[in-house]
């Protein structure tokens, strides 16, 4: 029993990193939309493949600048993520997009977003937006049945059932939490203190957390690595769209780091205000 304890501790630590990884999923609503909000300034970086999508251009509002006390850390990991996604992973993403037709990739994205609907549903409830909650539940029921487990987004045909993007970072913002400071995470990309804390709530509501945990059933440990595989697969599946947004917005930017930071903050503030 004592010998098994260190192994359990290792699995728990691994699971915590999985939670951080999967905690971004609700903000990763098809990262292809990230560039939409920021065309005048920036778009999603390749590292934003693990970060949010942006649905609408934000309304102009007056906000205090988000502090960047971890500038050196952030700049280093921004460069690392840019090199990893924009350099190392680019040929793989291009090859994947060439081999796998866009309708298939869209179907996989739809299925994953349908699977993690509890995150959006619970956050709509926590934001006291029962209309959004009922919409999310309706989308889930329609797409899970008529949409073959969510592979086809049947619900989008109804304008009243447009997809949402609620997450715990937005919920914290709804209840008055500010951005905090800006931070760039390895592989996960841009975030803020508030959104980083929100990742824990997102992970707790993610079905992957409950299906692939470090606990045991029938005396055997669950395959925790499937959390990595499923989430990593979703990130890779969306990478061609993410890189397209990255190239069209960041390449013309004089300072890509600042452009991406401003775009991310702008998007998240708009998401909270909606």
Image: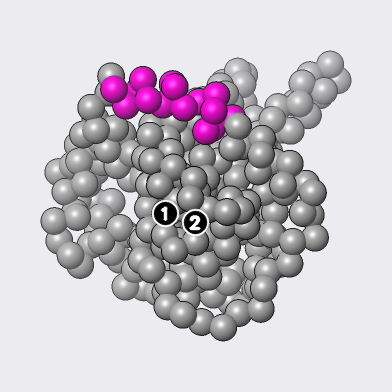
Observer-nearest of 120 and 57 = 57
**Residue 209 screen position, x and y as percent:** 55, 39
Residue named by callout 2: 42
**Residue 110 picture quarter:** top left
Q: Is residue 1 visible?
A: no
Q: Main secondary structure of the magenta part?
A: helix
Segment colored magenta: 84-98
Q: Is residue 117 left or right of residue 83?
A: left
Q: Is residue 28 left or right of residue 203?
A: left
Q: Residue furthest bottom?
A: 62
Q: Residue at x 59, y 37 (%)?
A: 82
Which sits earlier in the primary sequence, circle 1 or circle 2? 1
Q: Which mark is residue 35?
A: 1
**Residue 11 picture quarter:** top right
* Residues at marks 1 and 2 touching, judged by CB atoms closer than 8 Å: yes
Q: What is the total number of numbered labels drawn onto the structure image?
A: 2
Q: Residue at x 50, y 25 (%)?
A: 89
């Amino acid at each position: 029993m004592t010998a098994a304890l260190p192994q359990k501790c290792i699995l728990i630590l691994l699971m915590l990193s999985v939670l951080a990884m999967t905690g971004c999923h609700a903000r990763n609503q098809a990262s292809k939309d990230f560039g939409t909000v920021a065309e005048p300034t920036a778009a999603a970086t390749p590292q934003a493949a693990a970060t949010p999508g942006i649905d609408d251009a934000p309304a102009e509002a007056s906000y205090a600048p988000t502090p960047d006390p971890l500038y050196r850390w952030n700049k280093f990991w921004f460069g690392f993520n840019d090199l990893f996604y924009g350099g190392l992973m680019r040929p793989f993403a291009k090859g994947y997009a060439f081999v796998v037709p866009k309708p298939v990739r869209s179907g996989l994205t739809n299925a994953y977003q349908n699977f993690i609907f509890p995150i959006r549903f619970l956050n709509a409830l926590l934001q006291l937006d029962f209309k959004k909650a009922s919409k999310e539940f309706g989308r889930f029921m329609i797409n899970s049945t008529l949409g073959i487990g969510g592979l086809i987004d049947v619900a989008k045909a109804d304008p009243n059932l447009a997809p949402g993007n609620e997450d715990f970072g937005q919920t914290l913002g709804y209840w008055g939490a500010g951005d905090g400071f800006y931070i760039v995470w390895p592989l996960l990309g841009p975030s803020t203190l508030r959104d980083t804390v929100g990742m824990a709530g997102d992970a707790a509501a993610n079905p992957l957390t409950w299906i692939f945990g470090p606990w045991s059933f029938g005396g055997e440990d669950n395959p925790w690595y499937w959390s990595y595989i499923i989430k990593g697969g979703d990130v890779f599946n969306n990478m061609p769209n993410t890189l397209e947004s990255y190239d069209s917005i960041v390449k013309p930017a004089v300072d890509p780091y600042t452009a991406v930071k401003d775009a991310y903050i702008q998007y998240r503030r708009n998401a909270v205000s909606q």
